[in-house]
Structure formats: C-alpha cells, structure tokens
Amino acid sequence: MSRFELLRELCEAHGISGREDAVRNIILREIEPLADSVQVTPLGNIIAFQKGKKRPKTSLMLDAHMDEVGLIITDFTEEGFLRFSTVGGIDRRILPGKTVWIEGKLSGVIGVKPIHLLERDEREKSVPLKDLFIDIGAETREEAEKLVAPGDAVIFDSVFDLSHGKIKSKALDDRAGCALLIELMRDGLAYDTTFVFSVQEEVGLNGAKTAGYAVHPQAAIAVECTTAADVAGVERGRDVCRVGEGPVVSFMDRRTLYDREYYQLAFEAAKAAGVKCQPKRAVAGGNDAGAISTSCGGVRMASVSLPCRYLHAPVGIISQDDYEEAKKLLAVLAERIAETDTI
C-alpha cells in the first residue's frame, strides 16, 4: 500500500452527512484489529478504545468526523431536471458546471441558464441556489423519477492527486483527520485513549454531541481541516493559516473557546516533536469541539487541524508535510495531556 492509499480510499468514499456508511465500513475494517473495544452508536459514530502502556491521569478522547459536505435531491422540474439543496456549508458560487454523482451510480452536471441569455446585471452576480439544477440527461419528470428520488445523496466528482508535495481531493475535511486517527491507532499511543469517528459534523455537530456524553472524557482533541486562505488576492495576515507551515492550533472559533493551557501545550509539544506549528489567526468557523466541550460537565478542549485550501469545494488542497507533522504533534500532545492532572 502506498503512503496515502488509505487516505485516497477514505476520500473517494461517498459519505455526506447522515450517509457515512461507506466511510464507516473502511474505518471499521482498519481499526477493529487494533482496538480493545469498538462500538457503533445508534446515530452512527464509531467509538474505539485502545489500551496504552500506561493509564492516564486525564482521560482523553480524539475526534475526527466522517461526513463530507454535498447536496441532496429535493424535487424535479417537468423537463426532467433535478432540484437540490446543500448538505453543509457550500459556497454556491462554486456549483455551476460541476459534475456530480447521485447515490454513487448516476452522473450529472449542475446546470444554469446559459451566459448568452443572462441580462447584463445578472452576469456580475452569483447564481441563487433556486436557479440551479442537476442535469442527468432525462427529458421528462417521469423519466427522472424512475432514476432518482427526493432524499438521494449527491457528491462532487473529484480527483485524488499527490503531485507537488500536496494532496488534492474532495472530502479532505475530514477524511484526513480520520486517516490520522487510524495511523495513531496503528502506532499505538502511550496512554489509554478513546478514538471517535463522528457523524453529521457538517449539519450541526450532531455525532460529536452524542459522543461527548457517551465517552464522558476529561479532555479531548478535535482533529480537523481548517480554512487556509493563502491564495492570490489575500494579503498575508488575513490568510488565517498557510498550507505548508505546519498543523494549525486554534485558540477560539465561533463555537469554542479552547483551553488556554492546552493551546500553549500544543506549541510546546510541536517543539518537542521537532515540527512546525501555526496558530489559526482568525476567530471563524467551528468544529466538533463546540459540542464536545459543553457535553456532560464540560470537557477541556484542544484542536489540531490541517490547513486546507478550498474547504467545502469539489477539490481541496493540503500539504503532505503538514499531514506528517500533524501526526507527530498529535502523538506528543496526546501524551502530554494524558500525563497531566485534569485540574
């Protein structure tokens, strides 16, 4: 197996929120030989416990979510086109002209009124979601209804490319996090640890909320991808984080105020591991930490993310080096948290 073959398989699996089955099956195949116990919860989370060589002073949970953003079929037009809604936060500007897969078996293209039929003022505006449709080639509503049903899941048709030291793919958010947790389980952490692969992060952190109550950890690390805006037209300082400059540690986002001691501990752990590390230079977004940190009596929270360009788009980009350094950082940070008293 090549270095990133597991990540490729995870990214290429179809798994919008609530439809994570294919992703869950891959993860279960990989971790069941490694874990001391594995539970699949009614909502669909995987909760895996792995013994280490030592018992921790602070019980620790590592979390990554299985679901990806996508679309869902809602209705049909009389001409056989498919109406749809988004699953998770997707910038509608990126949708026109994209190819998609419906339920993993039927291809289509997201269509829009041709540019030569647009009024002058329409050409300068992004297209409202209500004016977009998926074209599968059907000629009537009846023909389309034989192939597709409301509630069918739609994912982006994408690539998986390893050129230039980067990884380009759909669903890096958060299949990269899932792959990192699997690799940490393969290597084995020093202390007993619970690993959670959660569902429905993109539609409200639903899996993480239930996992926090099920596991009841004293501390947790959300392993994620986060927005890197180091692209043309964005000045340095407003780019949030940069691809290639190491894993990202958050001090605050729109859902979570992270534990200050753990935030500082993450940079100490990065230094000890000999890896680069960068702060997330914006209070924006959110992840499973928002639900985990407020579960039960409260959970001390840290977040380690991979900087990713074009998050929630058909193709995102992360750095292979960032991935490797995140793995090293997580191993050291998990050990530092586990060996420290909670209070």
Image: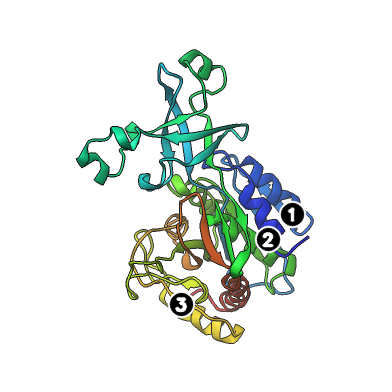
Colour scheme in use: rainbow
* Place of residue 62 in the rendered image (x, y in percent of width and height, measured from the top left): 58, 63
- At mark 1, the secondary structure is helix
Kindly check if marks 3 and 2 are in contact, taking CB atoms under 8 A apart as contact: no
In front here: 224 or 324?
324
Q: Residue furthest top?
A: 142
Say whether residue 325 is left or right of residue 279. Answer: right
**Label 2 sits on residue:** 182
- Classify 10 Å Cα crowding around label 1: few (below 14), some (14-19), many (20 and above): some
Out of 269 and 36, give the one closest to the viewer. Answer: 269
Inter-mark Cα distance, 1 to 2? 7 Å
Residue drawn at x 50%, y 61% as measured from the top left: 225
Q: Position of residue 128 (x, y in %)?
A: 30, 38
Q: Amino acid at mark 2?
A: Ile
In the image, residue 70 lies at what x, y percent? 48, 42
Q: Residue furthest left?
A: 121
Task: Name the residue type under label 1.
Answer: Glu
**Residue at 37% in and 70% down:** 239
In percent of width and height, residue 124 lies at 25, 46
In this view, the mark in front (3 or 1): 3
Residue 136 higher or lower than 232, as above or below: above
Q: Quadrant of residue 177?
A: bottom right
Residue that mark 3 sits on: 278
* The N terminus lies in quadrant: bottom right
Q: Are marks 1 and 2 in contact (CB under 8 Å)?
A: yes
Q: CA distance from mark 3 to mark 2?
A: 23 Å
Q: Is residue 118 above or below residue 205?
A: above
**How many residues crowd mark 3 within 10 Å: few (<14), some (14–19), many (20+)?**
many
